[in-house]
Image (cartoon, rainbow, N blue to C red):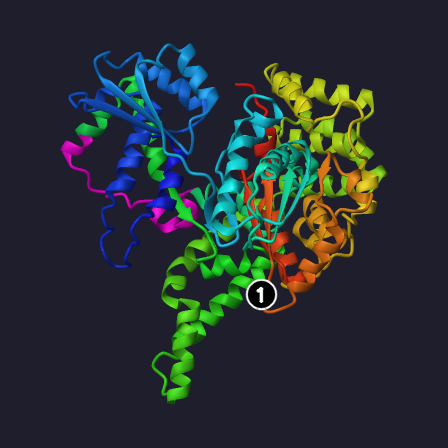
C-alpha cells in the first residue's frame, strides 16, 4: 500500500479517538497500513508471508508506484497469485507500463472506483494528484471522461442542471460532450437541486496558484501540504513534550550490549531502521470544519490568527469556569447549549495541538525567506517597475542557492506577468537556474513551457488588461475577520478564477470582458437574464446552488473566496475539483520522471 493511501483510509476508516489519561487503543487498520507502507518503501519482501496463496497491492494510479510494482514482481515467485487494486481508477498509463514491463498477464488488476469524494459540505474531489500534469503535458486525457461521468452521476441523483458554463479548452471539451448527449435524449428536463454548473480550467488562472496563499488554510497547505483533509507533520511540532522521550540514566549491561551490537548492522538494516524511525516521528492530523477552532479560522488571513486563538481560548476557559456555579433553569439550558455548540471538551483536547501548529507556521511565515518571496510577488503584480526590479534580482537569488522550487515559482509568475520577459532576462535566469541546480532542471523548464506556465514568447492575455478589467488588485485591502472583498486572501490580490464566477453572476458571461481571460467559453442561451433570475431567487427562503468545477486543481484560498462570495451574494457555492494545488505542486508537477 502506498503512503498516499493512508490519507484515503483515514477518511474512509478514521482512527479511533484517544482517551486522555488512558492507554492508546489499538488500531489494526492504521498499524497494518503503516507497517505495509514501510515494507513496500524498502522493497523488503522477506517480511511478507509468502506462504499465503496470494499477495495484494492496494495503491493509487501513479506511474511511479506502477514501476515499483514491476520491480517487486521480479522478486515474487511466478507461482504466486498477485492482485493489484487501483484506487480510485485504473488508468491507461499504468496499463501501458504493466504491458511494457511484461507483468500484465501475471497480475490480476482491479479498481476500487469512485468519482467525487466529499471532504466537506461544500467541497468534493476526484483526488487525482496527476490530473494537471497529465492534461498539461498531454500524457493522459482520460480524466476528462471521468469528469464528464461525475457530472452525469450528479445529474442522475439531483436532476439535470439547467445552466451550464465552461471556460477553457478542457472545460469546453467536457461540457460539449455532455451537451451532445443531452441533445439526443428526448426526456423532458426535470427540476434539479443544482441550479448552475461552472467549469473552469486551471490554465485560465495560473496567477492564483503561483502567488502565495495567505489564508490560514492556504498557509497550512503551502508548508504542510494538505492531503484529503489530512496533514502529515513531525510529532515534535504538534506535541513537543512527547517528541523527546526521557532517557533512563541507568542502562543495564544487556542494553549496552544490544547498543554495541546495533553498531554492526548492515547497510540495508541501517536503512530500514532509519525509515522506521522517520515514520514514527511523522503523525497524521485531520483538519476539517468539524474541528470548531479550525472551521472558524481557516478562511481568515493568517495575520489575524494571533488574535483569534487567544479569544477562543478565553471563551473556552470562561465556559469551563461556570461549570460549578449556581444557575437558574433558563441559565442552565443556555449553558448546556453553549457547551454543545462549542464542543468544549473536544476543543480543549485539540487546542494545544493547533496552538503548537500555529506557532510552527508563524515561525515559517516570519522567516526572512518567506517575507522576501511574498514581497517579490506583491511587488511584481503591482507595477511594471516592480516587475522589472524583481526580474533583475531573481538571478542573484538563484546564485545564493536558495530553495529552487520557490525560485522557479517566482520565475514562472514573472513570465506570465510580463508575457513574456525580455529575452536577455529570460535566458540569463533560465541559464543560471540550470547551472546552479543541475542539467536535469532543463527538462522541467521545457515541460513548464509546454504547459504554458513558463512563457518564453507572448501568449494569452496581458496581465494589465486582466488586472484592470477584473479589478484584481486592491492595495487598500483591510485585513478583517469579516472581509469586504476577496482580495484579502492574497493580501491585495483577488483570484481571477473567483472574479470570473463573480462576473458570471453579474453578466452571465455575456460581455466582452470574459474573452480577455485565457481560453474559449461555452455559454447557454439568454444567460444574463437567466442568471439574474437565479440570483434574485436566492434572496428568498432557499438559496440557489452553483457547482464550480475546477479542472486541473483548486487552491484553498480560492475556496475561501467562494465561501465569502456565498455569504455576500446569498448563493450556495459547492466546489468540485480534480485535485488541490499550490505553486510548489504546480512546478513540481512538471518534473521529468
Q: Is residue 86 left or right of residue 311?
A: left
Q: Position of residue 150 (x, y in %)?
A: 50, 40
Q: Position of residue 119 (x, y in %)?
A: 46, 48
Quadrant where the N terminus lies?
Answer: top left
Residue matched to label 1: 542
Q: Position of residue 93 (x, y in %)?
A: 48, 20
Extreme residue in the front direction? 186
Q: Residues within 10 Å of mark 1 (few under 14, many from 20)?
A: few
Q: Residue at x 63, y 21 (%)?
A: 447
Q: Residue at x 67, y 34 (%)?
A: 203
Part of the protein shown in magenta: 233-256
Q: Is residue 413 left or right of residue 1?
A: right
- The image quarter containing residue 537 is bottom right
In this rendering, is residue 273 above or below 328? above
- The image quarter containing residue 550 is top right
Work out whether residue 314 or residue 123 is closer to the camera in this orientation and state it: 123
Amino acid at each position: 500500500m502506498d503512503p498516499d493511501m493512508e490519507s484515503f483510509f483515514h477518511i474512509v476508516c478514521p482512527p479511533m479517538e484517544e482517551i486522555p489519561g488512558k492507554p492508546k487503543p489499538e488500531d489494526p487498520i492504521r498499524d497494518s497500513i503503516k507497517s505495509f507502507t514501510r515494507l513496500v518503501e524498502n522493497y523488503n519482501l522477506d517480511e511478507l508471508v509468502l506462504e499465503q496463496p496470494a499477495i495484494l497491492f492496494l495503491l493509487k494510479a501513479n506511474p511511479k508506484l506502477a514501476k515499483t510494482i514491476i520491480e517487486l514482481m521480479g522478486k515474487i515467485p511466478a507461482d504466486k497469485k498477485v492482485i493489484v487494486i487501483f484506487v480510485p481508477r485504473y488508468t491507461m498509463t499504468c496499463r501501458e507500463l504493466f504491458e511494457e514491463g511484461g507483468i500484465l498477464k501475471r497480475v490480476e488488476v482491479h479498481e476500487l472506483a469512485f468519482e467525487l469524494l466529499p471532504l466537506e459540505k461544500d467541497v468534493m474531489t476526484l483526488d487525482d494528484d496527476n490530473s494537471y500534469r497529465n492534461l498539461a503535458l498531454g500524457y493522459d486525457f482520460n480524466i476528462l471522461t471521468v469528469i464528464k461521468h461525475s457530472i452525469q452521476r450528479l445529474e442522475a441523483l439531483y436532476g439535470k442542471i439547467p445552466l451550464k458554463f465552461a471556460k477553457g479548452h478542457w472545460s469546453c471539451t467536457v461540457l460539449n460532450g455532455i451537451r451532445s448527449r443531452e441533445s439526443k435524449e428526448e426526456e423532458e428536463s426535470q427540476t434539479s437541486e443544482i441550479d448552475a454548473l461552472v467549469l473552469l480550467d486551471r490554465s485560465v488562472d495560473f496567477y492564483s496558484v503561483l502567488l502565495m496563499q495567505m489564508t490560514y488554510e492556504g498557509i497550512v497547505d503551502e508548508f504542510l501540504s494538505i492531503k484529503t483533509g489530512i496533514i502529515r507533520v513531525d510529532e515534535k511540532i504538534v506535541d513537543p513534550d512527547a517528541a523527546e522521550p526521557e532517557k533512563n540514566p541507568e542502562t543495564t549491561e544487556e542494553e549496552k550490549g544490544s547498543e554495541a551490537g546495533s553498531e554492526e548492522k548492515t547497510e540495508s538494516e541501517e536503512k530500514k531502521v532509519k525509515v522506521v524511525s522517520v515514520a514514527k516521528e511523522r503523525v497524521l492530523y485531520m483538519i476539517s470544519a468539524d474541528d470548531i477552532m479550525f472551521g472558524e479560522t481557516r478562511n481568515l488571513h493568517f495575520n489575524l490568527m494571533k488574535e483569534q486563538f487567544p479569544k477562543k481560548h478565553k471563551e473556552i476557559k470562561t465556559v469551563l469556569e461556570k461549570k460549578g456555579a449556581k444557575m437558574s433553569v433558563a441559565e442552565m439550558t443556555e449553558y448546556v447549549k453553549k457547551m454543545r455548540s462549542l464542543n468544549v471538551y473536544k476543543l480543549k483536547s485539540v487546542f494545544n495541538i493547533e496552538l503548537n501548529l500555529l506557532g510552527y507556521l508563524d515561525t515559517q511565515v516570519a522567516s526572512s525567506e518567506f517575507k522576501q518571496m511574498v514581497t517579490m510577488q506583491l511587488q511584481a503584480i503591482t507595477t511594471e517597475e516592480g516587475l522589472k526590479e524583481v526580474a533583475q534580482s531573481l538571478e542573484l537569488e538563484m546564485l545564493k542557492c536558495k530553495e529552487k522550487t520557490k525560485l522557479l515559482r517566482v520565475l514562472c509568475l514573472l513570465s506570465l506577468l510580463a508575457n513574456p520577459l525580455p529575452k536577455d532576462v529570460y535566458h540569463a535566469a533560465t541559464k543560471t537556474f540550470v547551472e546552479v541546480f543541475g542539467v536535469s532542471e532543463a527538462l522541467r523548464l521545457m515541460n513548464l513551457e509546454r504547459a504554458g506556465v513558463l512563457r518564453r514568447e507572448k501568449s494569452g492575455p496581458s496581465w494589465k488588461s486582466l488586472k484592470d478589467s477584473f479589478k484584481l488588485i486592491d492595495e487598500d485591502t483591510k485585513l478583517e475577520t469579516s472581509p469586504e472583498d476577496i482580495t484579502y486572501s492574497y493580501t491585495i490580490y483577488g483570484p481571477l478564477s473567483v472574479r470570473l464566477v463573480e462576473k458570471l453572476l453579474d453578466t452571465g458571461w455575456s460581455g466582452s470582458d470574459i474573452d480577455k481571460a485565457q481560453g474559449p467559453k461555452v455559454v447557454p442561451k439568454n444567460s444574463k437574464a437567466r442568471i439574474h433570475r437565479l440570483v434574485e431567487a436566492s434572496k428568498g427562503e432557499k438559496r440557489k446552488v452553483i457547482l464550480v468545477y475546477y479542472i486541473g486543481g483548486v487552491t484553498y484560498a480560492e475556496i475561501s473566496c467562494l465561501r465569502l462570495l456565498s455569504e455576500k451574494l446569498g448563493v450556495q457555492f459547492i466546489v468540485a475539483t480534480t485535485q488541490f494545488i499550490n505553486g510548489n505542486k504546480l512546478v513540481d508537477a512538471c518534473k521529468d520522471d
